Image (cartoon, coloured by chain):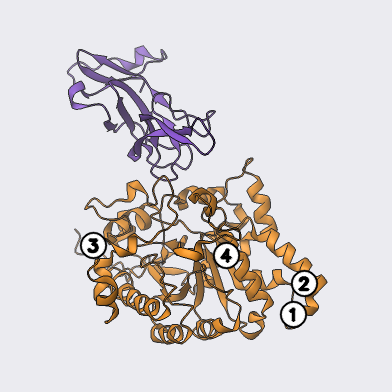
Amino acid sequence: MTQAEPNLATERPVKRTESVVVGRVEELPPGSVTIVPRGKFGIGVYNVGGSFFALTNYCLHRGAPLCRGQVTGKVVAGDGPYESKMVGVGEFLRCPWHGWEFEIATGRAVAYPEKAIRTYPVLVENGTVILEGL
Amino acid sequence: MGVQQADPRTSAEATVQVKVVDCDVHPALPTDLLLEYIPEPWRTQFYSGQLSEIEMTTPVYIPPVQTLRRDAVPPSGGMPGSDPAFLEKQLLRDGGVDFAQLIFLQPRPKPTHPALESAIFAGMNSFMADTWLGRHNRHGRYRGAIRVSPYDPEGAVREIDRWAGHPYINGVYVVPEASAPFGQPQFLPILEATARHDLALCMHVTRTPGMRLLTPVGHPSYHVEIFAQWPLYFFSHIASLVFEGVFETLPNLRIVCQEADFAWVPALMWRLDNEWRQLGSQVPHVKRAPSEYIREHFRFTTQPLDEPVPSESLLKVMDWLEADRVLMFASDYPHYDYDDPQWILPRLPKPARDRIMFENACDFFRLPRTRPRDEIDEAR
């Protein structure tokens, strides 16, 4: 508890967002996910190749704990018939239930580009990772 | 802790109204736990000396994502569905399931060798009775179907007779990837024993390896193809059971089609009814329209729930089907295509909700409408 409580009453109705410190950059290496217990479902903070992204831990399809899913790539058609290849390994997230895939950076569903998981901004300041927009 | 606290079993709220029956739940059966239940010579001949897990290495179509829910891995490790405490927590407590109908998918079928298959399934049944229907079932919320080999009718009948009367066994599970349609005479003893003991015949696709994975045009390349074709097995068995006149011979026979979805059922009923009106002289022993037999003798489980666009189309299908009569909820826990009961419930048409979530299953599986309050209720 802080000593001086901010006077929230005077600050409304200005829309403000809160932020929370997730950890130090070195504690959140590339490929890691940290589920921050904020909101009803928690928020997954991902380090994708040194860039940080955050998604609600709730699948828009059936409500699964999305961020418990596997970080993976995307299978796309190859150059010729009957060919396929894997691209963007580490940039996609697969839901632990029905396997829906989402791009971590945008929250967009691979199979349904018009659908997306809610994302949050993540800042890195002096080596500290901060989840914003709460 | 009050010493005055009433014993929950004798208090006014000692019983709980059943609201959710889950008709398709799969505990895991690791082979090392099964082995002691397999009689010799099969145990040594079939299982010993293998370098790899024989039950898991059978060639089957595998989904590209995962077959099991990643978040259903128990905290202690091990396979999803292997830890009774964790299954209780995820399915009974968080999912709000009152009764769970257990179907063991391991061991995999051994249809090439009926005697071996019978012996292994008998071992599986004993394991189930000792564990999930025994020491893991202190709350009495689990019911199970014993597995029998359709290719060893004599052994199957012996096995059904052996378990009949067990308080928690209410079904006989046969794998629908069969070598002949189940209405044919060689299967009648199994159907007769099932009906005689007031059990339900359960059919659940089990990805039997080999030729029985065939579609009518051979082996497709992908799991995504064959998954959508699994209802074809049920088409064949339903048409056979109806047109062989089985339900005239066995008016009490009840059959559950599990994990076969249901959107195809109205179309099948329309077609069979039409054919019967036009060509029924071929089957004079069939006295009623096929759809009447189907609605009376078959139940279909909800999972995997179809998701048409627009989603309201599913309500039309449910209407054609008379879903309030023939559908029963199933989650398929702990598989990746799990349907959460709390997600499904509000999406069902209101007048059919109770029928689908528990009433049809209570009737078909002979379940009570209330159960004793237990510590899982206290933990909710």
Q: Are marks 1 and 2 in contact (CB under 8 Å)?
A: yes
Disc 4 element: helix
Q: Colour of chain A?
A: purple
Residue bearing mark 1: B283
Q: Toward which corner of the image does residue B285 lie, by quadrant?
A: bottom right
- Same chain shared by disc 3 and disc 2: yes
> Could you classify mark 1 by the number of other residues whose Cα lies within 10 Å: few (under 14), some (14-19), or many (20 or more)?
few
Q: Would you place residue B210 above or below residue B342 in this image?
A: below
Write down the residue under mark 3.
B51
Q: Nearer the viewer, residue B11 or B300?
A: B300
Q: Residue B227 appears at what percent x and percent y?
A: 52, 53
Calculate the distance from the C-alpha at mark 4 to the C-alpha at mark 1.
22 Å
Instruction: State how far apart marks 1 and 2 are (Cα).
Output: 8 Å
Regarding residue A1, the answer to whether it shows in the image is no
List the residue tagged with mark 2: B276
Q: Earlier in the sequence, mark 3 or mark 4?
A: 3
**Depth-wise, is mark 3 or mark 4 nearer the camera?**
3
Q: Which chain: orange?
A: B
**Counting residues from the N terminus, which is met first, the one under dot 3 or under dot 2?**
3
Dot label at residue B233: 4
* Discs 4 and 1 carry the same chain letter: yes
Q: Chain of mark 4?
A: B
- Chain letter of disc 2? B
Amino acid type of the residue that numbered disc 1 sits on in the rendered structure: Val
- Measured as percent of width and height from the top left, residue B16 is found at 41, 64
Distance from label 2 to label 4 (Cα)?
20 Å
Determine the secondary structure under disc 1.
loop
